[in-house]
Image: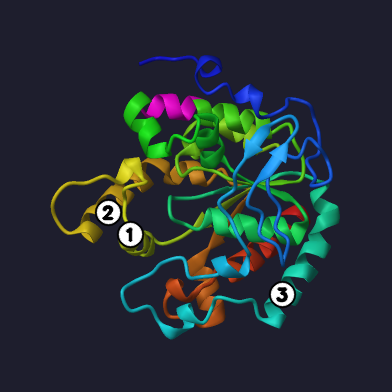
Amino acid sequence: MEVKVSQSLHLTTWISSDNAVPTMSNSMSLCTRFERNKRLNMLKCNHLGTIKPAIGHRQAGLKALCTSQNPPASVLESGTLTAEEDMVLKKKSMEIEPYLSGRCIYLVGMMGSGKTTIGQILAEVLDYSFFDSDKLIEQSAGGTAVADIFRLHGESFFRDNETEVLHKLSSMHRLVISTGGGAVVRPINWKYMHKGISIFIDVPLDALAQRITAIGTASRPLLHHGSGDAYVQTFKRLSMLWEERSESYTNAHVRVSLERIAAKLGHADVCSVTPTQIAIEALVQIEEYLKE
């Protein structure tokens, strides 16, 4: 079925084309921002209607990016920030803030790479607002899940609306945006994302397959598979997607490698790297890029 974007999800009804800076005190506020001691259950925006973010305290999300039936102790103990990590986050954010000049930050990477959790941490520490592009498409579709959008309308329909989302967000400032894994395949999307700073979260495929297998693939329409070992099937499908997308990921301004972080910290397994540590590395890489 071929349907025009403007006739499908009506994206212009929830995002203004005005070049407004969305802040929590502004009635044009587009999305959520963390508060350390408060959970945001619902944000009503005068212009956007109602957005229901599925997020909570930052500390609750600080778990390893891949899980298994018997995760290492370091993974289980990574649920809270250490004082040193908190200090580094604040210090780095203050150092790069003048260089960012309010530009948006776009997180790209394979599905399951932790873009949403990392994005929420970056948004809080930089005093930015946070968007998950997939969630915006779902909300615009009346709460229809991504998997159901794929099933009912096809991937091309979803990608058209994804492009429209990025187009609208690109006119904004002070946003951290978590994009879908396939957002990188369309050159037009890079045109929009390059108005800000793009960060590629690079996670080894075996770690992604391990985590996704543990969680399940029901919500990931491109990973549905038939019989056979779930991990093997997931790894094979991820490998195919990687072949299709790997070159596109190189368009990002910054690459954050979990293997590199694990090596720096002395971890034998990337699953021991926490989202907080990844966010710190992202800030370091942004600083290096902006100071070039």
Nearest to the observer: residue 288 or residue 22 = 22
Amino acid bearing label 3: Asp
| Magenta region includes residue 157 | yes
Query: Principal SS element in the magenta part?
Result: helix
Point 76% across, 44% down: residue: 103
Q: How far apart are labels 1 and 2 at the CA level?
A: 6 Å
Identify the residue at image location x=68%, y=29%.
Answer: 15
Cα separation, mark 3 vs mark 2, equals 35 Å
* Quarter of the figure that contains the C terminus: bottom right
Residue, far left: 227
SS label for mark 2:
helix
Q: Residues within 10 Å of mark 2 (few under 14, many from 20)?
A: many
Residue 292 or residue 15, whichever sits in front: 15
The image's colour scheme reads rainbow
Residue where numbered disc 1 is placed? 209
Instruction: Judge whether 144 appears above or below 7 on screen.
Output: below
Residue assigned mark 2: 234
Observer able to see residue 188:
no
Q: Residue at x 46, y 29 (%)?
A: 159
> Where residue 53 sits in the image (x, y, percent)?
59, 48
In this figure, which residue is indicated by the disc labeled 3?
86
**Whole-number angstrom distance, CA of label 3 to CA of label 1:** 30 Å
What's drawn in magenta, residue-wise? 154-160
Disc 1 residue type (three-letter): Ala
